[in-house]
Image (cartoon, rainbow, N blue to C red):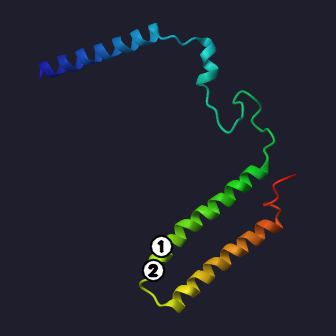
Amino acid sequence: MSNLIMLCLIITIISNLMMMISTLISKKSYMDREKSSPFECGFNPQSFNRMPFSLHFFLITLIFLIFDVEMALILPMINTFKMTNLMMWSTMSMFFLFILLLGIYHEWNQNMLKWLN
């Protein structure tokens, strides 16, 4: 039992010693603090939190997600073509495309597809 305690103590001392040495010889300085700060979406983290945000980027992301999910739903429908008859498969496809066209029409009415201001 004492060998196990001694081994744990040695491992702890060596790991702490390595961390202290790496901290002392590292080239980081106070000027590198800006590089270490989090960076997200082009906003400066030291600025005011409630900066105006263009809603257009958010809407483009939503359109991308809708069409990304569309691909995830269409691919399994191809496999079901072998298991169902043509009438059932075409009904499912038309219903799915109707929902997508309805979504695109709604986005068009909300001016989400307008690329220039």
Q: Is residue 28 left or right of residue 108?
A: left
Q: Is residue 117 above or below residue 86?
A: above
Q: Nearer the viewer, residue 59 or 114?
A: 114
Residue under the image location 80 percent in, 67 percent down: 108
Can you give x and y, in whole percent of width and height, for residue 64 in the image? 65, 58
Q: CB of mark 1 within 8 Å of CB of mark 2?
A: yes
Residue under the image location 39 percent in, 15 percent down: 19
Q: Which image quadrant: the N terminus?
A: top left
Can you give x and y, in whole percent of width and height, for residue 111 in the image? 83, 62
Residue at image mark 1: 76
Q: Residue flagged by tag 2: what amino acid is it?
A: Thr
Residue at image mark 2: 80
Residue under the image location 65 percent in, 37 percent down: 40
Q: Is residue 85 left or right of residue 8?
A: right
Q: Is residue 48 above or below residue 25?
A: below
Task: State how far apart marks 1 and 2 are (Cα).
Answer: 7 Å
Can you give x and y, in whole percent of width and height, for residue 26 in the image? 48, 11
